[in-house]
Image (tube, grey):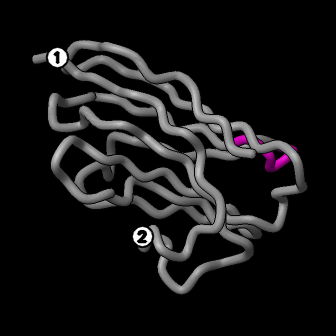
Amino acid sequence: QLQASGGGLVQAGDSLSLACAASGRTFSSYSMGWFRQAPGKEREFVAAISWSAGNAYYGNSVKGRFTISRGNAKNTVCLQMNSLKPEDTAVYYCAAVEYGPTSYGDPRVYDYWGQGTQVTVSS
C-alpha cells in the first residue's frame, strides 16, 4: 500500500528526490514519515509530516538538507534530499500512521511501511 521510489547512486553534494505513493485506502488522515537503515545499523528517523497541519519534523542528521512535502491529495509524500553525504547511504523507507503519533521519530508507532528504496552516495 506504500510504494517508495526515486533511489539511486549519486555523488556527494548531489540532490535526489524520493517519492512515496499510497494506495488501497485514503491516507488523508495519516501522518507520513521517512526512515532509513544502513547495513548493520538501526532504523533511523529521517523526516515526518503531520496529517492535519502539515507540520514537518526532521532527524538531526538531515535538518537543513532534507525537505519533506505532501501532495495535494495527501496520498503522496516526497523527500527532497540536498547536499547528500556518503553517510546518507541507506535503504529509505516511507511509513504511515493514523493521525498524529506520540513520537514521529519512533518507528514502532507506524502502521504501514513501504518496501524501501536504496540511496547510495559516493564520495
Instruction: Specify which label sits upstream in the sequence, 2 or 1.
Output: 2
Q: Position of residue 116 (x, y in %)?
A: 49, 38
Marking on residue 122: 1
Give the farthest residue toward the left: 123
Side of 68 where 58 appears, left or right:
left
Give the farthest residue toward the bottom: 102
- Does residue 75 sit above or below 82 in this rendering? below
- Does residue 31 sit above or below 1 in this rendering? below
Side of 70 where 110 appears, left or right:
left
Q: Amino acid at mark 1?
A: Ser
Type of secondary structure dominating the magenta stretch? loop
Q: Position of residue 117 (x, y in %)?
A: 47, 31
Q: Quadrant of the N terminus?
A: top right
Q: Quadrant of the C terminus?
A: top left
Q: CA distance from mark 2 to mark 1?
A: 27 Å
Side of 45 where 116 appears, left or right:
right
The residue depicted at 16 percent of the width and 37 percent of the height is: 87
The residue depicted at 65 percent of the width and 78 percent of the height is: 100
The residue depicted at 19 percent of the width and 53 percent of the height is: 41
Among the 4 quarters of the image, the one containing residue 16:
top left
Q: Position of residue 104 (x, y in %)?
A: 49, 72
Q: Depth check: give the residue in front, 72 or 39.
A: 39
How many C-alpha atoms fall within 10 Å of the one at disc 2: few (<14), some, or many (≥20)? many
Q: Amino acid at mark 2?
A: Gly
Residue 75 is a magenta residue: yes
Residue 65 is a magenta residue: no
- Does residue 121 sit above or below 68 in this rendering? above
How many C-alpha atoms fall within 10 Å of the one at disc 1: few (<14), some, or many (≥20)? some
Q: Which residue is mark 2?
A: 105
Query: Which stretch did the figure color magenta?
Result: 72-76
| Element under disc 1 | strand
| Element under disc 2 | loop
